[in-house]
Structure formats: structure tokens, C-alpha cells
Image (cartoon, rainbow, N blue to C red):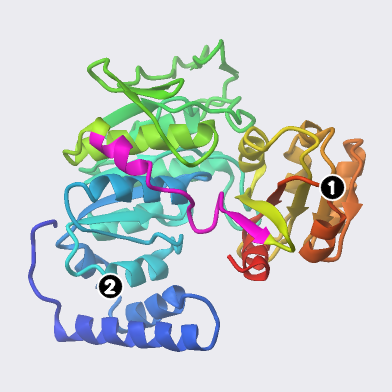
Amino acid sequence: MAGNTEPLSPRAKLAVTAGKAAAAVSRAAGRGSGSVIGGRVALKLDPDLLARLARHLDVVLVSATNGKTTTTRLIAEALRASGPVVSNALGANMPAGITSALAGGSDAKYGVIEVDEKYLAGVARDVTPKAIALLNLSRDQLDRAAETRMLAEKWREGLAGSKALIIANADDPLIVWAASSSANVVWVAAGQEWKDDAWSCPSCGGVMQRPGDDWFCGECGFRRPTPSWALSGDHVLDPHGSAWPIKLQLPGRANKANATTSAAVAAAFGVPPQVALERMFSVQAVAGRYDVVSFLERELRLLLAKNPAGWLETFSLIDPPPTPVIMSVNARGADGTDTSWLWDVDYTRLAGHPIFVLGDRKLDLAVRLEVAGLDFQVCDNIDEAVQMAPPGRIEVIANYTAFQDLRRRVGN
């Protein structure tokens, strides 16, 4: 628990040292940050290390299908107003990566941890969080992750009896159902643009009624709870009805929603909304997302979109036609090998944009765009796409490993 500064046991210290050494070797070999392999080595030597490393921290966990990396970063910035923070800021969000991150936070007061949806309940058992932020659930990596209703049920079972304060999105029925097993929930009206995974009631299977921003099940009475925090235009409304301006360098409505949830979390740790939101302004990019880079004498804005809900949000923030758009899609292990999700994305929103397609699964994407009736060019690599694109800043949208490939190529 937070406040317990009992030193690590010799075994735990050995595990931390070995993990850091493994990570250093991985970095030296050019195989990334080494956080995952370092954490795996450390946990092999001490399976209880994650719990030991979290004992002295006030921990908040952040989980969702979309937005968890950005929200984790915003919460971390807000809580730094009150003390040192350790966080897995680069998104290594399974137990090994989380362990590596916490191993570097011996002097921290707070732990702000992004958690992969599949591992939320287990990590929550290990680290005894003070708060858990639940943002959204939608279809993603269906070859690896459970169907959304099943995942919500795992969360509901795993969070039952938790002493943590749950800060949850009142606009997502799956999130509400998952969080409702907890005794202590703060509801946030953060919005839900993607609704295609929330038309049936997670409680009884009935058809959900969705008049305006409200929702309810006419069969069992399951309904949207009354939020105490809300996003309203460019302001956060707190439980007292006060409106606090949101000023972000990150684009789009989705990031205003992330900031609203982050302000609610910060308040639970004693950081006032005004202070929290002012600190969030310092975040310009998150692990390369939203960065604007120069490449081949052109300006590229790098955007990450991993699933249908993420693509929908991304389309809402790109510059209008005739801005050129480059899209890159892979289907490696970290992406999910099933690309059937491409058919759930409304690519007609890109009508009027010059479109260029690349990545391991560029032909899958090309077929989808052809069916959508869009004009596009298939390219072998980012260099070719940039050289073919008409003048102006280029929007580059990619899923997870494609995004990493692009970052390495453009020097970001």
C-alpha cells in the first residue's frame, strides 16, 4: 500500500538488477526500449515483484480500447503538481512492461499505469490501486482479445469488491456495466462516437435505446447513470457545476474527453481541476502520436489508429480535402493478425482526399477502399507515397506496428 517504504528484499533487488541489465542489452542490440524483456526477466526471478514495487505508491490504472496511452500521460502530468510520478509512458502495458516501469520509480509518490484490457483485473489485484480509470470498450484484435461483452464481464467480475475508486465513462454501456459491480464509482460524461459495439444491452441482451446522448434498455431497465463530471464543448464541468477551460496542444474531441477523465482522476488525488488542466497543456505528443515531422522536405503529421473506433476519431481531426492522406496497415502479432476490422471503418469519410496506401496489408486496405468507391494509389513505402503526394501537409494514419515502422523511417 502507499506509504509503505519497506526496502525491497534481496531477491527483489536481484530481480530488478537483472531486469535492467536485460533491458540494457536489448537496447544495445537495437531491439527497442527493452522494457518488456527486462520485465519478463525480473518477474521470472521474483513473480511477486510487481506487487512489491507498487507498495509505496498511490496507483491509478488506466484501461480502454482507445485513448489509454494519451490519458495515462495527461494524468501523469496532472499528478506531478503534487509529487513525483512513475509511469509506463511509452505504452508497454502488460505485466512485464509495467514491472519495468515501476522498477525505475523508487522515489515516486504516484504510479500512473496504462494496462492492456486483458490484464486489468490481474494487475489491479497485484498493485492495489487507489483509482482505476475506464474509458471505453470496442472491437479490437479479435484474434487475440475477447469479444467486447466477454471482456466487460471479465472486468465486472475482476473489479467486484475492489476498494479502488472507479472513474468510468457514463456514455459507454459496456463500461457502465463493467464498473457497476464496484461500490465506489465516479461517472464521467466523456462521450461515445463509436456506438457499433453498444446496441445490445450487456446486462440482458435486449436492444439498447439511444435517444440523443442518453441510453437505456427498455427490457431490463439498465440505463446511463447520472455523471458528476462532464465534457461540455471546450470545458470540463466538475461535480460543483464549475466550468474549467480545456487548453490542449493535442487535437480532436477525443483528447478533450481524455482530459475530462484525467481531471476527474486528478481530483481524486487532491489536484484541483484548474491546476490539472493547466499542466495537461504541456503535452504536445504522446509516444510520437500527433507529432509533425519533416521528411523529404515535406511536413507529415503522424496519427495512430488501431481499430474502427480509433479510425473514426482520427478522421474527425484530420485537415479537410484536398489534404493528402497516407494510410499504412500491418497485421503482425502486436496489431492482431485479423484484418476483417477494415470493413467496419467508414472510409467514405476520406472522399476528396488524395489517398496513398502502404504497409504489409496494403492490398487488404486497397480492396476495402475500392469497395468504398475511393480513388487511391498503392505504394511500396513511405518515401514513394510522400513523393507522389500533392503539395501541403500530409496526414499519415497507421496502425500499431505500421506506426512504429514509419517513426523509424522518418526519424521520429
In the image: residue 141, left or right of residue 362? left
At x 39%, y 52%, the residue is 120
Q: Give the residue pinned by disc 2.
A: 103
- Dot in front, 1 or 2: 1
Question: Going from the N terminus, do you reach mark 1 or mark 2 first?
Answer: 2
Which residue is found at the position 35% from the left and 31% from the top? 180
Bounds of the magenta span? 275-294
* Magenta-span inclusion, residue 276: yes
- For label 2, count other residues whose C-alpha is less than 10 Å away and answer few (under 14), some (14-19) or many (20+): many
Q: Quadrant of residue 344?
A: top right
Kind of element beneath mark 1: loop
Residue 141 % position (x, y): 63, 53
Question: Percent from the top left, x then y, of residue 26?
Answer: 48, 85
Is 68 rendered above or below residue 90? above
- Which kind of residue does numbered mark 1 sit on? Pro
Q: Position of residue 269 (x, y in %)?
A: 19, 41
Q: Above or below — where is 325 with respect to 277? A: below
> Can residue 179 be seen?
no
Residue that mark 1 sits on? 390
In the depicted structure, whether residue 405 falls above or below residue 277: below
